[in-house]
Amino acid sequence: MHNPRNYSDEHFLVDFEMQRAFLDNRAMVLTRKEFELLAALVGNAGDIVPREILLRNIWGYSREIRTRTLDVHIRRLRKKLAGFGDQYIETIFGVGYRFQPYRPPRTFPASLFIHAAPAA
């Protein structure tokens, strides 16, 4: 659950005060900028954070500066989040990025599946 001091779910914990993140109970090794970016996204979970806001607030870049720094850092964060990277960090093309809280895979009762007859 999200509160001002941390974010946690069954796989991921971000402690904003200690500036640490853990994936499946293992400390993530993050640079200062990676943590700042992660904290900005997680702190706004569910909301789209525009590229310009991230570039200005984390790197101090003005709107006129064209750089791939943000994209490189997002790619590194996704890699460090392993199999959860694309689920947690969503790209909103042409706008920015959004942190999506973990959602366990949906399971359906076997009775909902139609079983095809075996081929003859």
Image: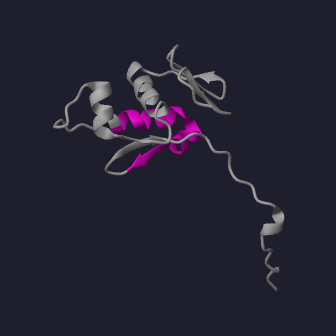
Which residue is situated farthest in the bottom direction here? 120
Residue 118 percent coordinates (x, y) = 82, 79
Q: Which residues are magenta?
A: 71-92
Which residue is situated farthest in the top direction here? 18
Residue 85 percent coordinates (x, y) = 52, 40
The answer to which quarter of the image holds residue 108 is bottom right
Q: Is residue 73 left or right of residue 68?
A: right
When the figure is inspected, residue 15 is found, relative to residue 99, above or below; the finding is above
Residue 95 percent coordinates (x, y) = 33, 47
The answer to which quarter of the image holds residue 64 is top left
Instruction: Give whichever of 17, 11 is nearer the camera.
Output: 17
Residue 30 seen in this snapshot: yes
User: Main SS type for the magenta part?
Assistant: helix
Which residue is situated farthest in the left direction here? 64
When the figure is inspected, residue 112 is found, relative to residue 88, above or below; the finding is below
- Residue 73 shown in magenta: yes
